[in-house]
Image (spheres, rainbow, N blue to C red):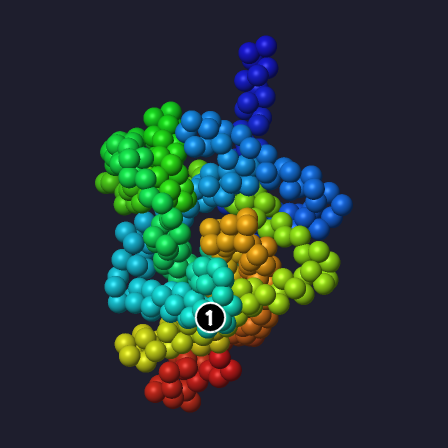
């Protein structure tokens, strides 16, 4: 019997490994995110809407620890903490070993990220300044960029785009998420309980000590991480902040002679759980908006809150990111590296308007269940993110074709001598003007 179980385990291990590799692909994560949101939206507007609502409102958990939460709250406060733990690892890696380590190189995407937060907020406030009530509480909803969704769109439509474009988007989104985390922790924390917050420090310190010592034993680290999460949740700060703190505690740089760093190891382990389960389940519950038919959809999108979110995501993000990038480039001389052009940057700026996961979370924090805007803000996030995704897809798809043709031209070997014609032209021809920054090439 034991031999049979061992054989089953050996057979299932490669399958689990293949499944993990599939879930680590950005395109798969984005597809699952969309599928979860689409399913929740469909159920909320179907004959099974009552069952869907009842499922999200089902409560379980220990009340003594303030963890008697609904399934929807477990998805937003619990599962999404896994997503933010992975985001924290990514943030730490960018600060320690990525583009954010070099202040000069980081200045462009960092400034663009800040402008991409400020301008959408300004647009939202301008549209809702006379709305009254709690409308202005949603000012931060259009400020977020969904890393997983945006990178998934870029991976699908931009197979031939330069890698520098992905690096720019990743750095931009990482800083954007950091700002969103600060906003959630600072602005959307109504009542702060200091005792649970202080009690969270010892397990956080113990977790930090162990990971700094390169301890990987889950039976030591997982209880400490759960304790930090539960105590941060009890303090009144949104529990996803605990995920970021735990991610920041993990060391990024490798020691001499060490294999993959601990942050890289944890990200490799937890990304399938985040992309394949945590984020899609959150999207399933968060995107379930009952529009009430076409008339209800029109009323939702006609709300000034929804209009502010859509305008902030589509117009504010694009203008803020692109405008700040251009201004910094003019001041510092740090222009997009060849073969990137400003239209490529514009495509990424529009892509930054995909708020989705974080925007839905901020919307839930801004407008409770009793608010008139609670469902309308979700409609605005969905409409704005979808619009930004479609516009960015058109721009980047066109640019992908341009870069593909340029790459094919550079590798063309018409005389089949094993040397691309472009190299023969540059070595044998003197017709190219050396002062031309495009090297005689046009059309980019």
Location of residue 222 in the rendering, given as x and y in whole percent from the top left corner: 38, 30
Q: Residue at (64%, 38%) from the top-left corner? A: 54
| Percent coordinates x, y for residue 376 in the rendering | 59, 59
Name the residue nearer the viewer: 179 or 132.
132
| 178, 444: nearer the viewer | 178
Q: Where in the figure is residue 9, as x and y percent of width and height?
A: 55, 22
Count the marks: 1
Q: Residue furthest top?
A: 1
Q: Say which element carries label 1.
A: loop
* Up-down relation of residue 193 to residue 303 (above or below): above
Which quadrant of the figure contains the N terminus? top right
- Front residue (pair 344, 207): 207
Which residue appears at 58% of the width and 26% of the height?
11
Residue drawn 64% across the image and 42% down it: 53
> Taking 379 as reference, is 92 above or below it?
above
- Residue 86 position, x and y percent, is 41, 45
Quarter of the image for residue 56 reads top right
Instruction: Name the residue carrying label 1.
Output: 129
Residue pictured at 46% horizontal, 82% vertical: 441
In the rendered image, the residue lying farthest to the right is: 47
| Residue 410 at least partly seen | no
In this view of the protein, which residue sits in the foreground, 10 or 204? 204
């Amino acid at each position: 019997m034991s031999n049979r179980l061992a054989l089953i385990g050996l057979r299932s291990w490669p399958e689990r490994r293949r499944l993990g590799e599939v879930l680590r692909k950005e395109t798969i994560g984005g597809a699952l995110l969309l599928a979860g949101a689409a399913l929740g939206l469909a159920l909320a507007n179907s004959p099974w809407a009552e069952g869907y609502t009842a499922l999200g409102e089902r409560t379980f958990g220990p009340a003594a620890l303030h963890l008697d939460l609904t399934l929807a709250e477990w998805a937003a406060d619990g599962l999404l903490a896994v997503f933010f733990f992975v985001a924290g690892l990514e943030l730490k890696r960018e600060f320690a070993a990525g583009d954010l380590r070099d202040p000069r190189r980081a200045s462009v995407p960092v400034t663009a990220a800040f402008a991409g937060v400020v301008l959408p907020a300004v647009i939202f406030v301008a549209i809702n300044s006379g709305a009254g009530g709690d409308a202005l509480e949603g000012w931060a909803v259009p400020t977020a960029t969904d890393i997983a969704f945006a990178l998934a769109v870029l991976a699908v439509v931009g197979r031939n785009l330069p890698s520098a474009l992905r690096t720019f988007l990743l750095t931009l989104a990482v800083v954007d998420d950091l700002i969103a985390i600060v906003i959630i922790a600072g602005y959307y924390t109504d009542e702060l309980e200091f005792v649970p917050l202080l009690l969270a420090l010892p397990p956080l310190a113990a977790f930090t000590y162990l990971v700094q010592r390169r301890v990987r034993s889950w039976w030591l680290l997982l209880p400490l991480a759960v304790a930090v999460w539960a105590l941060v949740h009890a303090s009144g700060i949104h529990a996803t902040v605990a995920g970021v703190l735990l991610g920041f505690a993990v060391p990024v740089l490798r020691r001499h002679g060490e294999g993959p760093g601990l942050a890289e190891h944890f990200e490799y382990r937890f990304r399938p759980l985040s992309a394949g389960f945590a984020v899609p389940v959150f999207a399933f519950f968060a995107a379930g908006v009952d529009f009430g038919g076409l008339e209800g959809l029109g009323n939702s999108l006609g709300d000034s809150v929804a209009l502010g979110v859509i305008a902030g995501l589509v117009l504010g993000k694009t203008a803020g990111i692109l405008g700040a990038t251009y201004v910094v480039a003019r001041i510092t001389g740090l222009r997009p590296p060849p073969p990137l052009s400003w239209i490529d940057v514009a495509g990424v700026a529009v892509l930054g308007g995909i708020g989705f996961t974080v925007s839905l979370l901020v919307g839930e924090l801004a407008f409770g269940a009793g608010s008139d805007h609670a469902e309308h803000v979700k409609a605005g996030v969905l409409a704005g993110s979808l619009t930004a995704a479609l516009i960015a897809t058109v721009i980047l798809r066109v640019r992908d074709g341009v870069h593909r043709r340029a790459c094919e031209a550079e590798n063309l070997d018409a005389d089949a001598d094993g040397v691309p014609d472009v190299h023969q032209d540059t070595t044998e021809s003197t017709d190219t003007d050396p002062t031309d920054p495009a090297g005689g090439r046009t059309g980019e």
